[in-house]
Image (cartoon, rainbow, N blue to C red):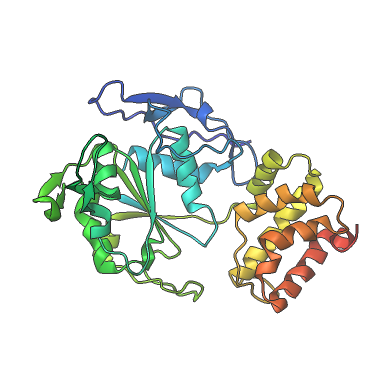
Amino acid sequence: MRNENINTTSVTPSAEEGFYTEINGSAFEHVINDDGSEYKFNPAWHCTGFADSAHPRIPQRDPNYVFSKSLLQDLLIFLLYPQGTALWLTGPTGCGKTSAVMQVASRLNWPVLDLTLNNRFEFTDLKGQWGLTQAEGQSTPTMKFIYNALPLAMRNGWILVLNEADLASPGELSALNDVIEGRNLLIAENQGEAVKPHPMFRLIVTGNSNGAGDESGLYQGIQQQNVAAMDRYRMLTVNYPTEKVEEGILANVAGNIDKKLRAQMCRFVQEMRKSFLGQGKGPSISIPFSTRSLVNWASAVQFYAMDKTPLKKALELFFLNKLSPEEREAANAVAVTVFGEQWNAA
C-alpha cells in the first residue's frame, strides 16, 4: 500500500488569534490512491482550518465522500499556498469538480460562496448594488449598498467558487485579474470603496474547458478566455474517479449490495463515460454519467428488489430515460456484456 505523505503544513496567519484552528488528517475519513488502496495520513500532518465549525456558509459534510489522494493534495496545496493565483478546475460534466472543493472546505470549516455563471454574466453582478432595505424596528426603508459574493468573500476570508466560468465573456472574467493578484476591489458604485482581501480569501473557478475553448463539441456556449487572464490561474484537470475509487464510494453508501455487483456497476459506468467522451467502441452517448448518478442508482436498487429487473429499473430513473432510443439500445447492449443474464432477468 502506498502511503506518500501529503506535503502541506500549517500556514496560519498571525492576525485574529482564535479565528483559526489546526486540523489533522483524521478529518478526511476516506482517502484512496488511484490503485484503490487506502491512503493513511502521517499522524503529524496538520493544516490550517477555521475554528467556527457552525458557520452557516460551511458546506454540508458528506461522511461517505471518498477523496482521491492526488486531487485532495492539489486542492490542499492551493488553499494553503495560493501564491497570488486563483485555481481553475477543468474537466467533463459530472466528474466532481465542485463537490471536491465543497468536501475539502467542509472538513476545514471554511465558508464557501458559490455561483454559476452564464453568457450574460457581468462583473458588476459580483460586486453588489444599491437597494431599499428596512431593518427591524425601522419605520421606513432606506437606500443601502448591498454587497454581493465577491466583496463578502474577500472581506471575510471565504472561498468564492464560480462554476461554468468558461461560459462568461472573457472581458468580464478578466476584471478579476486585480483581485487574483491580491489588490483591493474598488467598488465605484459605492463611492469608490476599496475592499481589502482577507489573507484567507480564495478564488476557485470551474469549467468544462481549460479556457482555450471547446474543441470536443460537447459543450455549447463555451468561450475562449483571455490569455493574459488565464496566466493568473493554476490549471488543475479533474477526471472522473477511477473504477477503484468509485468502488470505495459504493462500499460506503451501498454496502448491502454484493461486492461483485458493485464492481460491475462501476465498470458499466466507466464504459458509459468512454462512450460520452467518444472513446468507446460503440455509439456515442450524449449524457454524462456522474458519480452522483452512480450513488443514486446504487441507493435506489434496494427499493426495487421485488422488481423483475431491479438494476435496470433503478438505472432508468437516473440515466437510461435521459437517452435517445438509439443511445438507450447501445447502453443496454453494454449492460448485458457487463452484468450478463441478471440484467434482463430476475
Closest to the observer, 120 or 228: 120
Closest to the observer, 341 or 73: 341
- Percent from the top left, x then y, of residue 16? 24, 25
- Percent from the top left, x then y, of residue 292? 60, 52
In which quadrant will I find the N terminus? top right
- Percent from the top left, x then y, of residue 243? 66, 52
Residue name at image x 48 percent, y 60 percent? 91
| On screen, residue 167 above or below 184 | below
Closest to the observer, 96 or 83: 96
Q: Is residue 248 visible?
A: yes
Of all residues, the one furthest to the front in this rendering is 139
Specify the quadrant of the image occupied by residue 88.
bottom left
- Percent from the top left, x then y, of residue 208? 45, 64
Specify the quadrant of the image occupied by residue 74.
top left
Of all residues, the one furthest to the left in this rendering is 191
| On screen, residue 282 above or below 60 | below
Closest to the observer, 57 or 93: 57
In which quadrant will I find the C terminus? bottom right
Q: Is residue 83 visible?
A: no
How many marks can you see? Answer: 0
| On screen, residue 53 above or below 178 | above
The answer to whether 289 appears left or right of 60 in the picture is right
The answer to whether 305 appears left or right of 241 in the picture is right
Residue name at image x 58 percent, y 35 percent? 63
The answer to whether 124 appears left or right of 161 in the picture is left
